[in-house]
Amino acid sequence: MHLVLFILFAMLCVGGALNLVLQRHPINSALSLIVVMTSLAVLYLLLGAEFLAAAQVIVYSGAIMVLFVFVIMLLNAGEEDRTGGSRAAYAAGIPGVAALLGILAYVFLSHPRQFGAAHLGGFLVTTSDLSTVLFRDLLLPFELTSVLILVAILGAVVLARKEY
Amino acid sequence: MGNSVPIACYLGLAAVLFCIGISAFLIKRNIITIFMSIELMLNAVNLTFVAFAHEWHQLSGQIFVFFVMVVAAAEAAVGLAIIIAIFRSRETLNVDQINLMKS
């Protein structure tokens, strides 16, 4: 059951991410990113992170992607034109990405026994566990993030304001 | 059989997603899509955090993911406001035409 769900949603994730690269219209890329984020929420659920799965759907595929789609429609973004980018970025970037993927795959997959296996319900984090740590041990960082959000809201309003 | 998946598979999936995010960042020319690929990379790292939290039965990985989500939301709001400001002054979303500081 776990394996079937993992394979299904991992393929959805990779397919959505590849579709993000291949599509030329930004709205199609945004919709495929929503697919990726929602399937990641299911993977979080399989790993026992139920609060994070809910937060992923609400914050990422809800709030952030609505913001993206809103901006795409506000700016009336059309299909992107394929102008050639920086040569140095391609020359260094593509082999760099391949090397990074190779190293990571080697480290993670060469000795699969050094990591354990994930069982359904093997490590279930309830919302009350998470909130106990968050509001008792990490109260100051939590309050600081609210200040960060406030500053970000003010900055967004100032930046996007029409200049007269 | 079929009831457990190695953590290494989750980590490999996160690595693949991260590398797709980097290549999208390099290939795409639309500034909004480039911003979306940054979000994709953040999501891949979040999956790694959750997988390691499950591996070592620690809550701190999930707490970290929570804070990454908060910062990503703030970053998205500010970044999209900057994109709107750029579009107002330059009338384009193509990063190759936003080259005021070049030459």
Image (cartoon, coloured by chain):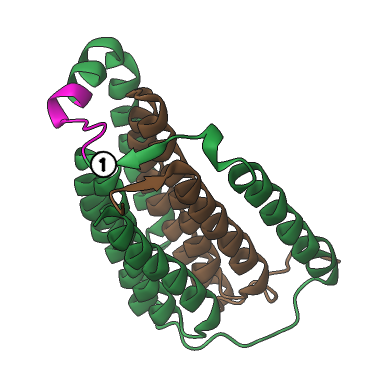
Chain colours: A green, B brown
* Span of residues in magenta: A121-130
Does residue B58 belong to the magenta stretch? Answer: no
Residue A141: give x, y in percent of width and height: 35, 20
> In the image, is residue A141 above or below residue A71?
above
Q: Compared to A144, does A121 lie above or below? A: below
Q: Is residue B19 left or right of residue A68?
A: right
- Magenta stretch: residue A127 in it? yes
Q: Quadrant of the C terminus of chain A?
A: bottom left
Q: Residue at x 27, y 53 (%)?
A: A2
Q: Quick one: B87 or B37, which is closer to the camera? A: B37
Look at label 1 and name its amino acid. Leu
Q: Image quadrant of residue A81?
A: bottom right
Q: As drawn, is B50 to the left or to the right of B23?
A: left
In the rendered image, is residue A78 in sight?
A: yes
| Relative depth, front residue between A152 and A91 | A91
Residue at image point 47% right, 58% down: B40
Residue A111, position as x, y percentages in the image? 61, 40
Residue A26 in percent (x, y) is at 45, 79
Chain of the residue that carries numbered disc 1 in the rendered image: A
Q: Residue at x 45, y 82 (%)?
A: A77
Quadrant for the N terminus of chain A, please: bottom left
Name the side, left or right, on which B91 lies relative to B54: right
Q: Residue at x 28, y 49 (%)?
A: B3
Look at the picture and state if A129 lies above or below A41. Answer: above
Q: Nearer the viewer, residue B102 or B12?
A: B12
> Element type at marker 1?
helix
How crowded is the residue under tag 1: few (<14 C-alpha within 10 Å), some, or many (20+)?
many
Q: Nearer the viewer, residue B90 or B68?
A: B68
Q: Where does label 1 land, which residue? A: A52
Helix, strand or loop: magenta stretch: loop
Rendered location of residue A143, percent (x, y): 28, 22
- Residue at the farthest left position: A128
